[in-house]
Amino acid sequence: MEHQPNNPLHGKTLETILTHLVDRYGWEELGKRININCFIHDPSIKSSLVFLRKTSWARKKVEDLYQESIS
């Protein structure tokens, strides 16, 4: 793997990012911040990962919120 010191997402899996956000905000707040059904209706890590892996705009929003939450 190439070393990327200025990229906070480098080496982080989508599952790690999502778990961090759920731990920090909870599903309800996460659904308010990023309005997607997998965060609002019967949320789970597994179903959210399936959706996020297929939907680039939603993944981008999750990654942006993660970067905001760690800065």
Image (cartoon, rainbow, N blue to C red):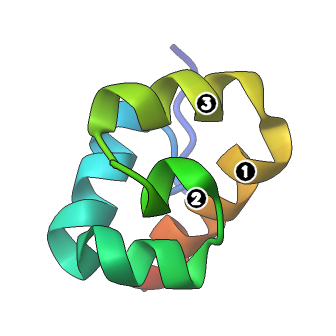
Which one is nearer the viewer's eye here, 39 or 53? 39
Q: Is residue 32 above or below residue 5?
A: below
- Coordinates of residue 14 in the picture (x, y in percent): 45, 35
Query: According to the image, label 1 marks what residue?
Result: 58
Q: Is residue 51 above or below residue 70?
A: above
Residue sitting at 21 percent across and 76 percent down?
24
Q: Earlier in the sequence, mark 2 or mark 3?
A: 3
Amino acid type, label 2: Val
Query: According to the image, label 2 marks what residue?
Result: 62
Identify the secondary structure beneath mark 1: helix
- Coordinates of residue 1 in the picture (x, y in percent): 51, 13
Amino acid type, label 1: Ala
Callout 1 crowding tier (Cα within 10 Å): few <14, some 14–19, many ≥20: some
Q: Marks 2/1: CA distance?
A: 6 Å
Which one is nearer the viewer's eye here, 3 or 19? 19
How many labels were placed on the picture?
3
Q: Which circle marks residue 51 in the picture?
A: 3
Q: Tell me where residue 46 sits by quadrant.
A: top left
Q: Tell me where residue 28 sits by quadrant.
A: bottom left
Residue sitting at 32 percent across and 65 percent down?
21
* Contact (Cβ within 8 Å) of mark 2 with mark 3: no
* Contact (Cβ within 8 Å) of mark 3 with mark 1: yes
Residue sitting at 55 percent across and 73 percent down?
65
User: Is label 2 or label 3 in front?
Assistant: 3
